[in-house]
Amino acid sequence: MNLRLIYKRLLGCHGPQGWWPIVNPRTLTSEYHMNAPRNGSDFFEIAVGAIMTQSVSWKNVDKAIAVLKKNKLLNPESILHIRIKTLAGMIRPTGYYNQKAKKIKNFIAWFSRHGCSYDALLRKDHAELRNELLAVNGIGPETADSILLYALNCKIFVVDAYTKRIFTRLGFFTVNEDYHGMQNIFHAGFRGTAQEFNEFHALIVAHGKNYCIRDPNCIDCCLSDLCSSKNSGPALS
């Protein structure tokens, strides 16, 4: 069993996911397959979305981004000058909104040190950027890597709860791997482009939401013949 085979199976099952979605300022709904980031505005929206999507579904983040866009506040300069309490109220659908408002403010403080310049970030070393993001209070490995992969097109694999659940069931992980141990399995075993890393992670999320759920739907799963844990019940969260 190899990761390329699993990628092809998931792509055949779910089709291209077109992540990261960008909220249309006219309709205030997410649009996929936008080839984002196209510019600094997309970068900022993706980065803020990556922070807000911690521990919540995308539909809730979608609502919060729509509110910010409707009020013409989804830019670093505007958010920098509004109170945390005001920002928290606007992103209330994302849950833990007070903490997330502080995290967004912390991110913008870091971004400001780079002149709030998307182009400046594109010129920096990826490993250096990652270390800087991890030093921002409230940004952990998954969020940092989401920003690097989806907002800056860096070739880095994002590991989330869906990844851990699916690939533990498939036998790639044990219960002992930490984030970087799981990530290294993908870096070593999947020789893909940054765009393929993007697509693979988005496909994993789709599969984790629709098939490899806590009580898995093994009968209809496109990976069931590869999975030694099929029909074993809801052992993994």
Image: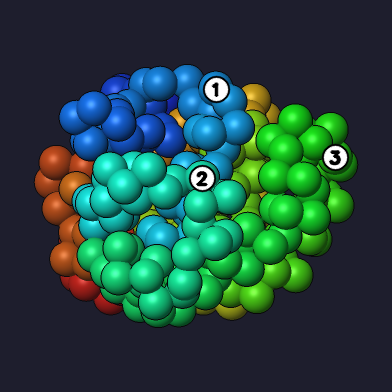
CA–CA distance in space, label 2 to label 3? 21 Å
Which amino acid is tagged 1? Answer: Arg
Residue 192 got which mark?
Answer: none
Quick one: SS at disc 3? loop
Question: What x and y, as percent, mark residue 1?
Answer: 50, 39
- Taking depth in this image into account, of 157 and 51 the one nearest to the observer is 51
Number of numbered tags placed on the structure image: 3
Say which amino acid is labelled 2. Asn
* Label 3 vs 1, first from the N-terminus: 1
Is there CB contact under 8 Å for labels 3 and 1? no
Q: Is residue 82 left or right of residue 131?
A: left
Name the residue that disc number 1 marks. 38
Q: The C terminus appears in which quarter of the rendering?
A: bottom left
The residue that appears at 69% across and 69% down in the rendered structure is: 136
Kind of residue at badge 3: Lys
Q: Which residue is mark 2?
A: 75
Q: Which residue is mark 3?
A: 124
Image location (x, y in percent) of residue 86: 37, 70
Image marks 2 and 3: residues in contact by CB distance under 8 Å? no
